[in-house]
Image (cartoon, rainbow, N blue to C red):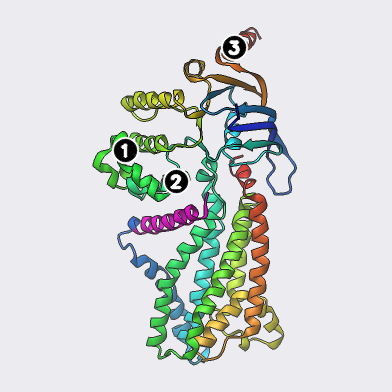
Amino acid sequence: MKSHLELQSVSFSYRTGKTFFSKKRKNVLKDLSFKIYPGETLGVIGRNGAGKSTLLRLLSDIITPDEGKIVRNCKKVDLLSIELGFSEQLSGIDNVILSGLFNGFSKKEILSKMDSIIEMSGIGKAVNNPLITFSSGMRARLGFSIAYHLEPDILLIDEVLGVGDIDFQTKSEKLIKEKMKSDQTVILVTHDPDLIKDVCNRVIWIEHGKVVKIGTTYEVVDAYLDYMLKSFSKNKKG
Amino acid sequence: MKKKQFWELVKFRVQCDLKAEVDKYALSYFWWIFEPGLHLFILYIVFGVFFQGNNQPHYIPFLFCGIVPWFWFNKSVTSGMESILNGRQIIRDTYIPKYFFPTVSIIQDLVKEMLVLLILIIVLFISGVYPTKMWVLLPVILVLQLLLIASIVYFISIIVPYFLDLKQIISTLMQIVMFGAGTFYDFKTMPEEYHKLFLLNPIALLINMYRDILIYNNFISIRSCVYILLYIVLFGILGYFAHKHLDKEVPKVLFR
């Protein structure tokens, strides 16, 4: 099968010095190679600071690798980003348009989805008010509904699934899970082994910027849990 | 991002930002005129009334022709240089060409400048300066100034995130540029040996051109135009290469 995306020994480091000329760098990812196939949901698991979020930024082409190559056979790879480009003074409607435009959609496409977005958010007529009058729950609902309606070739999700109050959390989590199980190609970054077991076809385990294991969901998640348990009890003894 | 989408986004963002700015204040749109209007009024009191304008004829139009272009330049550069820095929330979450941010900033200041230009023209009328044939050249000077602003802002906006001290340096530099631009005096009244220094300052050249066509009914100085074009080409090339090389590099310093 032809891959959507292919990483070929990708390495990445951040500059940490204060000036332009500083050579100080912090290695984040080292020699990463894997492929992403159409329709699959690929889980990325690993501890804090393993380089998972940086990986998503490389995939969505926000930054480029220092070494190696990312081969792209599809057009849009987008981070599921709630409240992207939101502006306090503008109305909910204007924010929907702005957020959609930032996500690379045309005004026409966004307007055609407007009703469905407003309906999903459950905000009703308040959508005409400035965002500054919204509660944080309402903002999150609107943000989620926009993000949900965008259909990139590959959807990148970083941790958070459910947003807003408890009702909406359940609803949004269910919707996103449905999306992941559908034909949508998804890369999901999370700490949550149960979630990965529920939705992913394949999993990559990253530790200190390197791939430890790639494989089927149960194989990798079990190995990861095993490792975590061992390091946990080691810490306890020490 | 396709070209059409890019400009659709620029247009919508400019509209939104202007609207947002207006909705914040009770006096809304009037601030765009009040704010520069108050500055102009204070300068008028200090230099026009207290100092009697160095006994120069047409001092008020002379002063306003200096201050208005200066305000435009100052505002565009100081707000534009931080545009990419301030866009980091968006840059973190999606890919967008970085020149988007300075573009929006420059256009916003251009829109506001058009209103201030209107004040300038009204003041000229009140002071008894009326349009001549030379006024047709005004758009040429406006375009020159816009290009100068754009070339400088595109370049520094992408350098500032790497070198935050540049913000302080530029603020100081702007003071020097202002005092050296002959905004409230005529540099030709200074000793001859310093004239060359003034001619190094593109804003001084621009201000001279505004005065030449609007007040003195003179043709614009071609030599000044060439000098300004040289600045534009220089900063334009620097900006082009800076954006080309740093477009996907600058996010790395924005969220380190």
Q: Quadrant of residue A35?
A: top right
Counting from the top left corner in percent of width and height, residue A43 is at: 55, 23
Q: Which residue is mark 2?
A: A105
Q: Amino acid at mark 1?
A: Ser
Tag 1 secondary structure: helix
The residues bearing labels 1 and 2 have C-alpha atoms spaced at a distance of 16 Å
Q: Chain of mark 2?
A: A
Picture residue at 47% right of the left edge, 43% below the top:
A103
Callouts 3 and 1 in the same chain: yes
Q: Residue B29 vs residue A26: left or right?
A: left
Q: Residue B65 vs residue A122: left or right?
A: right
Q: Chain of mark 1?
A: A
Q: Which residue is mark 1?
A: A116
Q: Amino acid at mark 2?
A: Phe
Overall secondary structure of the magenta section: helix
The residues bearing labels 3 and 1 have C-alpha atoms spaced at a distance of 40 Å
Q: Is residue B51 visible?
A: no
Q: Is residue B21 visible?
A: yes
Q: Quadrant of residue A214?
A: top right
Q: Which mark is residue A107?
A: none
Counting from the top left corner in percent of width and height, residue B143 is at: 53, 74
State the extent of the magenta-drawn residues as a range. Answer: B1-22
Task: Tell me which label, 2 or 3, sits earlier in the chain.
Answer: 2
Q: Chain of mark 3?
A: A
Tag 2 secondary structure: loop
Q: Mark 1, residues whose alpha carbon is within 10 Å: few (<14), some, or many (≥20)?
A: few
Q: Which mark is residue A219?
A: 3
Q: Amino acid at mark 3?
A: Glu
